[in-house]
Amino acid sequence: MSLGALLGLALSLKLIGTLDLPKDLTVDGAPLGGVSGVDYDRRTGDWLMISDDRSDKAPARFFVGRLDYDAHGVKGLRLTGQVPLRQPDGSTFAGSRSPSGERVDAEALRIDPRTSELVWTSEGDAARGFDPSLRRMNRAGAWRGTISTPPAFRFDPAKAEGARPNQTFEGVSFSPGGRWLWLAMEAPLVEDGAVSTVAQGGVTRITRLDRSGRVMAQYAYRLDPVQAAALHRGDNGVSEILAVDDRRLLVLERSGVEGEPGRFAFHCRLYLVDLATGQDIAGRRSLLGATPRTLAKRLLVNFDHVPGGAVNLEAMTWGRELGGKRTLVLLADDNFATDQAQRVLVFGVR
């Protein structure tokens, strides 16, 4: 099948509605905010939302809730619980005020379709020597072990190699049925070249793991350039991925552009990629030199053109069906900032 035919099997998305969540939503004293990953449990109807709060507002946690929407719009979100993330000894994770311990940076969460346990990622804590990680837990937040990830994704400042701090495991998704686990790096490894700039996009890696963490394939993904010139800081990277079927992925890219100090504008885009268009690069230490064939991508949504879409979109999952068709749900990470929205966007899928 030709490249055009592969990506011609595209999805069609239609916005159903958006909803800005109140800033004062709490459960047991833990504020909702920093939502960086979400998944929907079709068996129970629960929505699980993980926060990237590094145990500063409350212990690092995920929330459980009920999201109400139909074909006419998004009605509301009702929180029913919050679950602290636990270390192997049962303790919660350290916060920034703690002199030691891992300040875990949770970024993505998925329900294992085979076991119903949860898999979640942390971007690591480079300053304290904790590498990015992929972990398992039960519904009560109890530690159930780790999943191996490639050694190249660790921090290695002594060799100027490996992951860049806070630009690591942003996206994770099970394949349908749970045979494979897809893992996306937010930004390029040091040895893979520069991060995205306004002039040019960097190249990051998307990896297919088996259930034990063994690398089965790996692909190069060309990021977009930073979407606007920044007065201070600007970046662009993968903020989430989601499997469509055994061959295709949705890839969410997010640019954050700082204008006035501490004030960001966000530009997000959603792409469809087909793994048949890429080259397996699992054996390559560096992507510099002979550039590999990167995954072809097709733009599905430019959120700059979607009402309510100019927010920091980091969480994405399939929702419940409406009229026999899929829905796609995205949530924004508000960074606990008063000027950033906690927004829900729901799309119908054809």
Image (cartoon, rainbow, N blue to C red):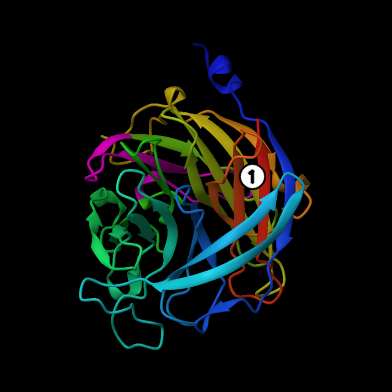
Q: In front: 283, or 112?
A: 112
Q: Does the magenta stretch include residue 347?
A: no
Q: Quadrant of residue 118?
A: bottom left
Residue at 53% over, 41% down: 251
Q: Which residue lies furthest to the front in this view?
A: 44
User: Is residue 294 something one can see in this rendering?
Assistant: no
Q: In which quarter of the image is residue 256?
A: bottom right
**Mark 1 closeness class: few <14, some 14–19, many ≥20 residues within 10 Å:** many
Residue at 68% over, 67% down: 21
**Residue 263 appears at what percent x and percent y?**
69, 71
Is 2 left, or right, of 219 in this rendering?
right
Q: In front: 79, or 238?
A: 79
Q: Is residue 211 magenta?
A: yes
Q: Name the residue under label 1.
A: 269
Q: In which quarter of the image is residue 160?
A: bottom left
Q: Relative to 127, is 329 above or below?
A: above
User: Is residue 256 something one can see in this rendering?
Assistant: yes
Residue at 49% over, 44% down: 241
Q: At label 1, which amino acid type do we have?
A: Arg
Label 1: element kind: strand
**Residue 174 appears at what percent x and percent y?**
39, 42
Q: Quadrant of the C terminus?
A: top right
Q: What stretch is highlighted in magenta?
A: 191-217
**Residue 56 appears at what percent x and percent y?**
46, 82
